[in-house]
Amino acid sequence: MKLFDVYPLYEVTPVKAKGVYVYDKKRQKYLDLYGGHAVISIGHSHPHFVRKISRQLKKIGFYSNAIQNPLQSQLASTIGEHSNLHEFELFLCSTGAEAIENGLKLSSFHTGRKKVIAFRGAFHGRTSAAVAVTDNKSINAPLNSQHEVTFLPFNDIDKLEKELAKQTYCAVIFESIQGVGGLDEPDRSFVIAMDSLCKKYGSCLIADEVQSGFGRSGTFFAFQKYPIKPHIITMAKGMGNGFPIGGILIHPEIKAKFGMLGTTFGGNHLACVASLAVLDILKKEHLQEKAENLEIYFRKKAAEIPEIIKVKGRGLMLGLEFNFEIGDLRKSLVYNHHIFTGGSSNKKLIRILPPLTLKEKHFDIFFKALKTALEKNNSTQ
């Protein structure tokens, strides 16, 4: 049997990782500026993370949600402390797409409506409702067309109000910083208006923090740059530093009832301990605050390279935009300079999503390599 061939793969086989580095089977070291799609938040194989999971595994790794698991309540309280969203309630699942599915479903339960507003360039996942609110027709199967989704551009308040005034939408879902879409952000005035209009017309506002959450943007959640309070906040990726975990935070005006939501693996003992370990390190090592400072340093270094036409994003969720497609440049960074970076639907943009334990010296290595790669690229044109 062979694998179902859906991934274009680099010819690199990692076998070990530590801190901000990944090592392949040939013992070659790679600087990881992509974190496996923003998943690695506290660095690979952090000793505290490994220790906490190992200890828990010796006790109990999994049991169903039919029994009490105090680790879930501990995780809820700790997320509340970090985010200052103490009044919200937590539902745990296993992935970002599952978080989006549950957030949309909960909005529909709460409002009694079924239509959704999403935004151009959005990426929310690959499962049924999650991919339906993703602005990419090539990954939407005919089955997904059963969902009624209206895609709007960012920053057009009039169009948004015109749709919401129909009072047929259960939710508006948005990313404060679009990940796969290319690091675009809505204007502050639009975000505030979106929050106000959802309240006015009875739609739920869902903040998708799957990629941007847990300190990556310089605030605990990226939406917290703005004076808004969504009804539902989705999270995953950096929440578990590589251990599969996701969840949604739910505003207290949305009421729970037995059987409304459910999951098999969500909130298991190992997942909770993994996320608690992440939160321990975020706090102890001040990683959220460091993300803000590293963004400043990154922008300063980027300003030295004339080929970069724009720096996008916040914290350690960043993008470098060029006036040419960057596929070959990224390959050069991997194969010639041993640096992992990310792409996006914007083919002219490199995404930078490193572990939050990164230091300035690692950006020095990257920008030195980038200059060399660009010089070679320019000489062959």
Image (tube, grey):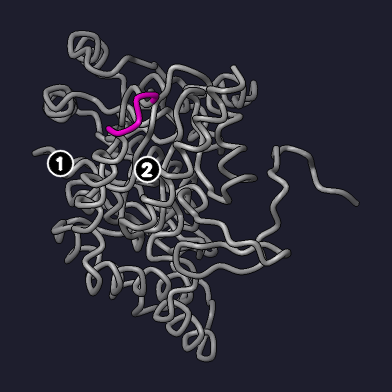
The answer to whether residue 358 is above or below residue 60 is above
Task: Identify residue type, mark 1.
Answer: Lys
Q: Quadrant of the C terminus?
A: top right
Whether residue 227 appears in magenta in the rendering, the answer is: no
Q: Is residue 200 visible?
A: no
Q: Residue 30: image x %, image y %? A: 56, 57
**Quadrant of residue 184 within the rendered picture:** top left
* Residue matched to label 2: 103
* Residue matched to label 1: 225
**Quadrant of residue 207 within the rendered picture:** top left
Local secondary structure at mark 1: helix
Q: Residue at x 36, y 74 (%)?
A: 277
Is residue 277 left or right of 227 when viewed as pictured?
right
Is residue 233 left or right of 202 when viewed as pictured?
right
Q: CA distance from mark 1 to mark 2?
A: 21 Å
Q: Which residues are magenta?
A: 303-307
Is residue 135 left or right of 360 when viewed as pictured?
right
Q: Residue 371: image x %, image y %? A: 44, 36
Frontmost of labels 1 and 2 is 1
Give the mark nearest the N terminus, 1 or 2.
2
> Who is closer to the viewer here, 100 or 183?
183
- Magenta part mainly helix, strand or loop? loop
> Who is closer to the viewer here, 110 or 161?
161
Q: Is residue 318 visible?
A: yes
